[in-house]
Image: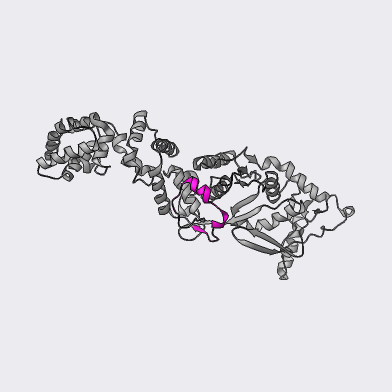
Amino acid sequence: MSNPVVTRFAPSPTGFLHIGGARTALFNWLYARGRGGKFLLRIEDTDRARSTPEAAATILQGMAWLGLDHDGEVVSQFEGAARHAEVAHQLLAEGKAYKCFSTQDEITAFRDAAKAEGKSTLFRSPWRDAAAASHPDAPFVVRIKAPQTGETVIQDQVQGNVTIKNDQLDDMVLLRSDGSPVYMLAVVVDDHDMGVTHVIRGDDHLNNAARQMMIYQAMDWDVPVWAHIPLIHGPDGKKLSKRHGALGAQEYQAMGYPAAGMRNYLARLGWSHGDDEFFTDAQARDWFDLDGIGKSPARFDTKKLENLSGQHIAITEDAALRREIEAYLAAAGQPPLSAPQAEGLERAMPCLKDRAKTFPELLEKAHFVLTSRPLDRDAKAEKALDPVSIGILSELTPHLQNASWTREELETALNAFAETKETKFGKLAGPLRAVLAGRAVTPSVFDMMICLGRDETLARLNDVTG
């Protein structure tokens, strides 16, 4: 029986959860969840100058919004420093690493001279094979003994086989002169100790894989399955950056995109399953595989995100949608809904959610049920309520008092009334919108009447007709 799949997401806590990081987390989550495996989270906080607890908290909040739950405790890379150093000392003891006493000035001088002579600037330490007896009493770094002949082949599930000649690899530093482990060592030790079987990450890490494989092989550890995914570009084909707009996952929450729409869209950024654009979480978990990831960078397209978000809003259960909208309002720093507003919003969902692409759009359509009497009317609504229209609405009120409050009955009653006035219902719709919502653009008049109920509808009519 093969080992269970274990993936990980390992962000650096130096800022928000970047949209590219969110997609990496999603791919790892989908791959593990679709195979009954584990999805682990490690915070790579070894850079103490730039890592902050606030940034780590922001990353966790972004993942929580996206619904990317992880297994077990969050691992702090910094806290594993003693374990990382232990591995370097083991390699030193086994003769697979060595102490290098070359100073930074000596390394710089070597590189400058090599550059001037047109030779390789790859530093070859004179201490690689030096006997311990010749070691001075001076600061040193610990370097791994890189293979100097042959080739290293990165068998990548996305990029294919990537071959690197070993004479292009330097003896990478494992421990700095103060004894602290470098990031490249920490990553490998953590991935091994956490039992990570598949490393799915951005292709900007592809070159790191060859150097990290040196540590796996020196320790006789299983090398994980590599999958280096292309970066995300903006609509102009350049690497996604601040100039393209929102970058953090939570910025999209505050802009009013549903989490399910964002998951669907991020999954489609660089991965495909046939021609399927819209799919549920369950389908994504079933379908997601490394074979479907393309080699080319994906382009972020806000219109596609909006389109998918609208489709997810339409299929979300009403109570769940109300809860997510309440979370959106909090994320956007807007006032919360009152209990009657929340209740009215949920009741009105069937006539709101089919055409809204974002939560601000949906709330705009929901204005009629979120506002309270007396209504504030916009200019167009005021214009629709001229004296003639108000007179007609006064005559309509008794017909509504006696109508049975179903959509079919209301349509029959209003159309019959319009006929008695020798007009079409369309002529009544504008003034009714103004009365019921205080706006000229609203959901269907019948939908609003059903959602508001008989008493509230008649009260809003009476406010205008007296």
Tell whether position 200 is magenta.
no
Quick one: which residue is furthest to the front in this view?
Answer: 1
Left/right placement of residue 398 relative to residue 220 reads left
Q: Which residue is pictured at 33% across the width and 34% down the height?
A: 347
Picture quadrant of residue 393: top left
Q: Nearer the viewer, residue 61 or 346?
A: 346
Percent coordinates x, y for residue 262 in the rendering: 46, 47
Left/right placement of residue 304 relative to residue 178 reads left
Q: Which segment is the magenta one? A: 277-298
Could you tell me if residue 100 is visible in this image? no
Percent coordinates x, y for residue 53 in the rendering: 59, 38
Q: Nearer the viewer, residue 30 or 282?
A: 282
Above or below: residue 167 compared with residue 73: below
Q: Which residue is pictured at 65% across the width and 59% down the height?
A: 155
Quick one: which residue is furthest to the bottom in this view?
Answer: 117
Above or below: residue 130 compared with residue 283: below
